[in-house]
Structure formats: C-alpha cells, structure tokens
C-alpha cells in the first residue's frame, strides 16, 4: 500500500498543495512552520478521520476558509482508489471514493492504513488514559473499520445515559426523586455496545503485547523488559486473563453480563455523582517497565523508547494481518539519539512506503535516503 498522490486545499496553512509520491522513502525537509507536518497530517486524516495533533476538525481548516479538502490516490495491490474528504466545521463532513459520494465519511476507512509516529506520542506513556484509549481504538479501526461504527454507537449511548444520570442526580439533590424509569433501557444499550468494544480492545491488547515487548527490546536492548495489559473499569468482575499477554479471547456475552452487573452495583453512586462510572470510557492500558508503571518511573529516553515500541508494534501487527501500512515519521529523528535513529531507520527501510518529515536533512539516517522534497514558503519542490 502506498500514497501515490496528495492534494490539499485550505488545509491548515496550505491554500493549495499538490505532491506526487512513490513507494519507498520520501523525506519532506523544511524549517519549523513551513507546513511539512500539515501534509502528513492530511494523509493521516484520510486513514483515521482524525488528527494526531488536535481533537477537533476546526483547526484543520485554513483561517478564513469555509472548508478544507483532502484528496489522496491510494494504491493497494495494484488497484488505485481516489479518496476525497471535505472538512466543514459545524456541519457534516462529506466523502467521495473515485469521485462518487458515499453515505458517511467513515465509509472510506480501510482504504488507507497508516502508522504515524510523532513527538506527540510521548503522551502515550506520560499522558492520561484517554491518550492510550485513543491509540487502541485507532488501531482497532485500522484492523477492522467496522469498529468505527461500534465506537460511535457506544459514544452516542454514553452521552444519552450520562445526561440522564446528571438530570436525575440534580433532581435528587434538589429534594426530588429524579426520573430514572428509562435507566434500565440505557443500561442494556451501554452494556451491549460496550461489551463489543471492550471485547475487541481486550483481544487487540493481547495480540499487540508480544509485538510491543519485541519492539522495545529492539530499540532499547539495554533497558528493562516491558509489558502491556488492559485495565478495565470492571475490576474483579472482568473474567481473569483477558487483555493480558497470552490471554484467552474475550466473550462478548460474558462481558455484557459483567457490565450489566456492575452498572446495577454502582447505580446509586452514579446517580449521586451524575456520571457513568463503568464502561470502556473508564478503562486504561497498563504500560509496565520492569516491575513498575512506565508513567512516573520511566526516564525520558525509556519513555521515548516505549512510545516508539507501541507504534512499531502497531505497524508489525498490521503487517501480520496481511496489511502493508504506510509508515509516517513526523519530525521524530531530532528527538532520538543516534542508536535509536538507526534502529528505527532499519525497521522503516523495509516498509513499502515511509514518509518522513525533518527540519534538518542531516537528521534523517542514510538508510532512508530516497525521494527528497523541500518545503519552503508555500511550495513543495522535489529535489532528488
């Protein structure tokens, strides 16, 4: 799989950009603020319908413009598809495949698969659980695009149920009884959609764990070993062994029953606090270095190595599934020491396509010497 062509209009800082790519390594070189990251961000958006830098679409549209457009020509096993996304803040985004409209933007998911490593990835280790949940969910959708719908259904139910809890809690604090007659119905919806999402996450972490351990040993052979596991808000109600290295596959029915049981157990607390206390939105991925949590105990170099190992593990897992994702390395070589640069370059050199951004060409290892583009003053010019 590779991106043959990228065209953007009013995306971030670019009124217009038009870039042709080839398989192999392509390096975009430009000083900070020239827009090279914006270009790979556009490619990542086509793959995930999200940005690795911001949580909403509004910043993706150039100041003063009504909408942004991203077009990519993606080649996979000899077949080319043109994907077009129109991003309009405050309105529904639109998508086209081979110039024909599709019902929903998420219908384009799966056409392009990317694994992107960027400086922001340090938050995977040092940030809050939401960063790790997002990492798992994006990888889950890359493996099986239908889970974009599962996640959307769960988020919709969570929003409705949370609003009901908040209203009921406020009413009780004001001396009323609070109307919770429909709460059982929303419990059922939350448990059903939540169990499907939770089962998929648990199995994903189980599949990912050996790749993380292997990738970390490759990039930091002198460090302590690492492992990952899934921590569910179900606590002891979660069947043992799930979401752990070598664990069993998750059973959706058992998880739905466990979720319903926990929702019943904490109902009084939820109404009092006005929030939903059980479900995949409360979960986390444990990152363990040696015998201690990586967050708070890993050094700066170990944190970088762990973040890199997570992305490389995602790349290897997708390859093991039979997919050859595009590897995107956004301004990361400047953050790594020489040894880690070389180890990352060794892995990247085997990719069908790797897109690299760098402020200084000398930061990019020779193993990734390929096509070279200068990004300067609103232009992208191929120089090699």
Image (cartoon, rainbow, N blue to C red):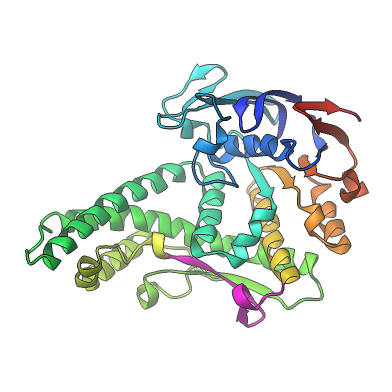
Residue in view at x 11 percent, y 65 percent? 174
Between residue 193 and residue 223, name the one nearer to us.
223
**The quadrant where residue 194 appears:** bottom left
Between residue 199 and residue 186, name the one nearer to us.
186
Q: Would residue 251 be visible to someone looking at this image?
A: no
Q: In the rendered view of the protein, which quadrant contains the C terminus?
A: top right
The stretch of residues the image draws in magenta is: 283-299
Q: Would residue 141 be visible to someone looking at this image?
A: yes
Where's residue 180, x and y in %? Answer: 13, 59
Between residue 18 and residue 245, name the one nearer to us.
18
Left or right for 274, reference 308:
left
Left or right for 20, reference 136:
right
Is 336 magenta? The answer is no
Q: In the rendered view of the protein, which quadrant contains the N terminus?
A: top right
Vertical placement of residue 280 versus 97, above or below: below
Residue in view at x 21 percent, y 59 percent? 165
Where's residue 121, x and y in %? Answer: 65, 57
Left or right for 42, reference 368:
left
Where's residue 89, x and y in %? Answer: 45, 32
**The quadrant where residue 259 appears:** bottom left
């Amino acid at each position: 799989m590779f991106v043959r062509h990228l065209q953007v209009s009013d995306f971030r800082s670019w009124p217009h950009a038009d870039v042709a790519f080839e398989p192999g390594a392509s390096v975009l070189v430009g000083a900070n603020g020239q827009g090279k990251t914006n270009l790979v961000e556009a490619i990542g958006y086509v793959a995930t319908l999200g940005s690795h830098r911001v949580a909403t679409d509004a910043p993706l549209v150039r100041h003063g413009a009504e909408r942004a457009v991203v077009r990519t020509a993606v080649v996979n096993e000899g077949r080319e598809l043109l994907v077009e996304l129109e991003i309009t803040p405050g309105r529904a985004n639109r998508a086209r495949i081979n110039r024909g409209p599709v019902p929903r933007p998420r219908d384009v998911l799966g056409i392009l698969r990317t694994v992107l490593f960027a400086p922001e990835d340090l938050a995977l280790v040092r940030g809050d659980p939401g960063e790790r949940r997002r990492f798992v969910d994006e990888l889950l959708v890359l493996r099986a695009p239908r889970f974009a719908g599962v996640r959307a259904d769960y988020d919709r139910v969570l929003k409705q149920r949370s609003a009901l809890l908040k209203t009921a809690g406020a009413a009780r604090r004001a001396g009323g009884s609070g109307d919770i007659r429909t709460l059982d119905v929303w419990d059922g919806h939350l448990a059903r959609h939540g169990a499907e999402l939770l089962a998929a996450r648990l199995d994903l972490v189980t599949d990912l764990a050996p790749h993380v351990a292997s990738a970390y040993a490759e990039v930091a052979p002198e460090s302590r070993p690492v492992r990952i596991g899934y921590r569910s808000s179900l606590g002891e109600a979660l069947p043992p062994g799930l979401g752990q290295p070598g664990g069993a596959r998750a059973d959706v029915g058992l998880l739905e029953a466990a979720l319903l049981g926990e929702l019943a157990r904490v109902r009084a607390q939820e109404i009092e606090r006005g929030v939903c206390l059980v479900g995949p939105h409360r979960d986390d991925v444990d990152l363990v270095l040696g015998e201690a949590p990586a967050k708070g105990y890993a050094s700066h170099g170990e944190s970088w190595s762990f973040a890199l190992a997570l992305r490389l593990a995602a790349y290897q897992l997708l390859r093991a599934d039979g997919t050859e994702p595009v590897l995107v390395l956004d301004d990361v070589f400047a953050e790594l020491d020489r040894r880690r640069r070389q180890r990352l370059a060794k892995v990247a050199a085997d990719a069908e396509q790797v897109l690299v951004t760098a402020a200084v060409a000398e930061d990019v290892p020779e193993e990734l010497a390929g096509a070279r583009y200068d990004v300067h003053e609103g232009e992208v010019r191929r120089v090699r």
